[in-house]
Amino acid sequence: EVWNPNGKYRVVSTKPMPGTRWINLLIEQDCRVEICTQKKTILSVEDIIALIGDKCDGVIGQLTEDWGETLFAALSRAGGKAFSNMAVGYNNVDVNAANKYGIAVGNTPGVLTETTAELAASLSLAAARRIVEADEFMRAGLYDGWLPNLFKSPILLFFPDRFVGNLLKGQTVGVIGAGRIGSAYARMMFLKANGEQPVTWKRASSMDEVLREADVISLHPVLDKTTYHLINKERLATMKKEAILVNCSRGPVIDEVALVEHLKQNPMFRVGLDVFEDEPYMKPGLSEMKNAIVVPHIASASKWTREGMATLAALNVLGKIKGYPIWGNPNQ
Ligand code: DGY
């Protein structure tokens, strides 16, 4: 799909993005905008090289793409100056390779802070109150009337505790990675406790202390070499048996094979996961675990946020082409 075919600067978006504001911004500044409409969800390096072609001033890309040496070399050969991920995370981007080819890199911080924190809070509450299991129970037609007493109905053979979960009020909330999103999550969870003390943000504590003491732990670190498999078999073993673990950061922060084993051994331990180690796949066994809630990387999925991300990504690329400051710049 091509907009403003006679524009001076050629900007490519590897995916259609929401809204039209980002397209208008580029067109107003004399850009020809090309949007890849290939049906394939994840584009290969070869697909993207073909999109870049012989002349390309800037590219807006997605977190599913591998922006390494090969792509930055191709973009540089095409005269490109800028690349922006339409995401705040940029673990798919080799910033050093971009620097080597003189290509500025942008990301989209800010507009997804509250949206992502809201999903982490939703997963925390949904896991605590076992909402997904209870929903499945209703839809399966198994609800045979309210019971104050557990272990009575024959149906309860399969649902022996009838979705008794955790009351979060009074519990300790831990945040690993208290940046923009982690801090917003902490504020939301603190509000949940009506400002009463016990939901505690463990910013000052060491990570292992947080893992040992918290009842609910939400992960918000950047994924890099130091945070790969941060939550492994050994660390899982130090957590409370009834703890809730939420991950809206990046999948490889958790050793997912170890997590599946831990969920099997500890039925009262619950997780809410938005991201997975080998997205779009889940490690074997995870989808069968009743104590896991899994959703498909939707933390930034609100209309306002996604349009904001697209606009920021366009501004980043435009900024470099036109010599304005870049909004989101991981190098800063
Ligand atoms: C990001 O922006 O990094 C999220 O994972 C997707 O919105």
Image (cartoon, rainbow, N blue to C red):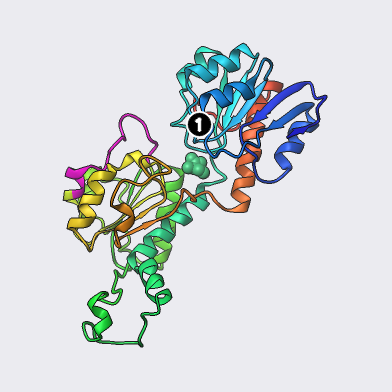
Q: Secondary structure at mark 1?
A: loop
At 25% from the left edge and 48% from the top edge, which residue is drawn? 259
Horizontal side of residue 82 vs 186, given as left or right: right
Horizontal side of residue 47 vs 236, given as left or right: right
Q: Circle 1 is placed at which residue position?
A: 65
Count the marks: how many? 1
Residue 144 to residue 298: above or below: below
Towards the viewer: 202 or 319: 319
Residue 84 place in picture, x, y as percent: 58, 30
Residue 307 place in picture, x, y as percent: 64, 46
Residue 315 falls in image quadrant: top right
Horizontal side of residue 93 vs 245, given as left or right: right
Q: The disc labelled 1 sits on which kind of residue?
A: Glu
Q: Is residue 271 visible?
A: no
Towards the viewer: 35 or 95: 35
Q: Is residue 229 magenta?
A: yes
At 30% from the left edge and 87% from the top edge, which residue is drawn? 147
First to last magenta residue range: 221-236
Magenta span dominant secondary structure: loop
Towards the viewer: 190 or 153: 153
Residue 61 falls in image quadrant: top right
Residue 274 place in picture, x, y as percent: 42, 50
Horizontal side of residue 185 vs 237, given as left or right: right
Q: As drawn, which residue projects farthest toward the right?
A: 6
Residue 263 place in picture, x, y as percent: 23, 55
Image quadrant containing the N terminus: top right
At 50% from the left edge and 35% from the top edge, which residue is drawn? 63
At 60% from the left edge and 41% from the top edge, which residue is drawn? 309
